[in-house]
Image (spheres, grey):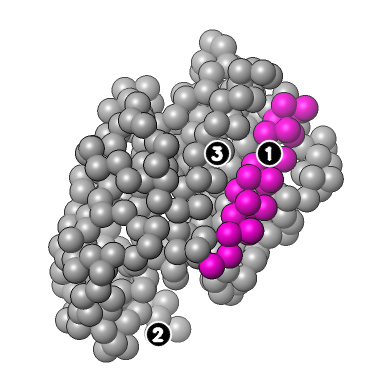
C-alpha cells in the first residue's frame, strides 16, 4: 500500500518531532503537527523550532494527546494515512520527580493514539520507544530479542508499556505499527535536559560539569538527522507490508562512545576545556547503551552516516550561535 501524502506527527515542536516534520515536508508530504507546548523546558525553544517550518503544506495544532475528543475530531476530519507518534514526557531523571505526568502523556496519551488508529483505520503507525527499556540488561549490544523486564526508571516502564499496548492492538485489531527504540539522540535544536546541552552550556560559562559514575559510562550517541532518516525509512517499509504487523527495532549509530570521549570531542568543537566534577551513578541511570541495528538495516536499508566528530561539530556550531543570541 503506498503512503498517502498526509501524515500526523505528534510532538511536532520537540527535538526529533520538528526535524521529522521538516524532512517529511521536503519529501512532498502534507503534514499536520500537534504538540501541547508544555513547560518541561523553555517553550521559546519549541516555538523557535516551529518558526523554522514555513512550508505551506504544514499545519500546526496546539493540543494535548491526552485530550481524547480533540484527537478524535482531528482523525475524523483529516483522514491520515500515517501517524508518526513522538509526543511523550521524556527524561529519565524527571520521572523521579513527577511520575504522574509520565502516566498521563506516555500511557493515556498513547492509548488515545492507538484508539484513533483503530477507529479510523490508520494503515501505518510508527511510534517512539526508547533504549531505556533495556534497563539493567548488561549484555551488549542490545538486541530487540533481549529480555526487557528489569527497567531502571518509570520512564522506561512507560515506554515498554507502549510496546505491549501496540502489540495488543495489533493482535486484537490488526493495527499496523512499528516501534523504534531510540538510542541517545543529539544534534542542533536538541533538548536542554540532555547531557550534550548541559555540558555545552556549563563549558561556555566556565562552570564545572557533573560526570556521573566517575566517567565510567558509554552511550550510543546518534545524530538527529540519522534518526529522522530512519523514521522515514521505517514509514516507507511499514507501508509496503502485505499484511499488518507489529515490529520493534533499535535505532542508533551502533557504536558505543565513552562519556569522557564525548566530552573531549565537545571540548575540541567548542574550544573550551571542561572542569569535571566526578560523581557516583544517579538513580534510574544505566552504565552503557549500545544498539544492534541489524534488523532495521536489513528491513529498511537504514545506515547512519554521521560520525561522532561530525555530529558534535554540527551541534557545537549551532549551540555557540544559539547561546550568544
What mark, if any, has residue 111 been given in the picture? 1
**At which x and y percent is residue 42?**
56, 74
Which quadrant holds residue 174?
A: top right
Mark 3 / mark 1, whichever is N-terminal = 1
Give the residue pinned by disc 2: 324
Residue 119 within the segment the image draws in magenta: yes
In the rendered view, tell whether residue 241 sits above or below residue 256: above
Q: Residue at x 67, y 34 (%)?
A: 114
Residue 99 shown in magenta: yes
Left or right of 188 on screen, residue 91: right
Which residue, given by chain and number where applicable, does mark 3 sit on?
Answer: 161
On the image, the x and y values in percent for residue 105 come to: 64, 52
Magenta residues span 97-120
Label number found at residue 82: none
Q: Quadrant of the N terminus?
A: top right
Disc 2 and disc 3: Cα gap in Å? Answer: 41 Å
Q: Main secondary structure of the magenta part?
A: helix
The secondary structure type at the circle numbered 2 is loop
Residue 197 place in picture, x, y as percent:
37, 71
Amino acid at each position: 500500500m503506498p503512503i498517502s501524502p498526509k501524515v500526523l506527527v505528534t510532538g511536532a515542536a520537540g527535538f526529533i518531532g520538528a526535524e521529522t516534520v521538516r524532512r517529511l515536508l521536503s519529501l512532498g508530504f502534507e503534514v499536520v503537527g500537534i504538540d501541547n507546548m508544555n513547560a518541561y523546558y523553555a517553550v521559546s525553544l519549541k516555538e523557535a523550532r516551529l518558526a523554522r517550518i514555513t512550508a505551506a503544506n504544514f499545519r500546526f495544532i496546539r493540543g494535548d494527546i491526552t485530550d481524547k475528543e480533540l484527537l478524535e475530531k482531528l482523525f475524523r476530519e483529516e483522514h491520515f494515512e500515517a501517524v508518526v507518534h513522538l509526543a511523550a514526557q521524556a527524561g529519565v531523571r524527571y520521572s523521579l520527580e513527577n511520575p504522574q505526568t509520565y502516566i498521563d502523556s506516555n500511557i493515556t496519551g498513547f492509548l488515545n493514539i492507538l484508539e484513533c488508529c483503530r477507529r479510523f483505520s490508520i494503515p501505518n503507525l510508527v511510534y517512539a520507544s526508547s533504549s531505556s527499556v533495556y534497563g539493567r540488561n548488561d549484555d551488549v549490544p542490545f538486541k530487540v530479542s533481549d529480555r526487557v523486564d528489569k527497567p531502571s526508571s518509570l520512564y522506561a516502564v512507560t515506554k515498554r508499556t507502549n510496546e505491549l499496548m501496540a502489540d495488543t492492538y495489533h493482535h486484537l485489531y490488526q493495527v499496523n505499527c512499528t516501534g523504534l527504540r531510540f538510542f541517545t539522540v543529539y544534534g542542533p535544536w536538541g533538548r536542554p535536559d540532555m547531557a550534550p546541552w548541559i555540558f555545552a552550556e556549563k563549558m561556555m560559562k566556565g562552570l564545572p560539569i557533573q560526570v556521573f559514575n566517575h566517567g565510567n559510562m558509554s552511550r550510543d550517541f546518534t545524530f538527529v538527522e540519522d534518526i529522522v532518516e530512519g523514521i522515514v525509512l521505517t514509514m516507507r517499509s511499514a507501508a509496503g507490508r502485505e499484511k499488518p504487523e507489529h515490529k520493534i527495532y533499535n535505532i542508533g549509530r551502533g557504536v558505543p562512545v565513552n562519556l569522557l570521549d564525548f566530552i573531549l570531542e565537545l571540548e575540541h568543537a567548542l574550544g573550551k576545556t571542561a572542569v569535571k566534577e566526578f560523581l557516583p551513578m544517579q538513580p534510574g541511570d544505566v552504565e552503557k547503551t549500545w544498539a544492534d541495528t541489524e534488523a532495521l538495516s536489513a528491513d529498511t536499508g537504514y545506515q547512519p552516516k554521521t560520525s561522532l566528530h561530525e555530529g558534535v561539530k554540527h551541534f557545537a556550531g549551532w549551540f555557540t550561535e544559539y547561546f550568544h543570541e
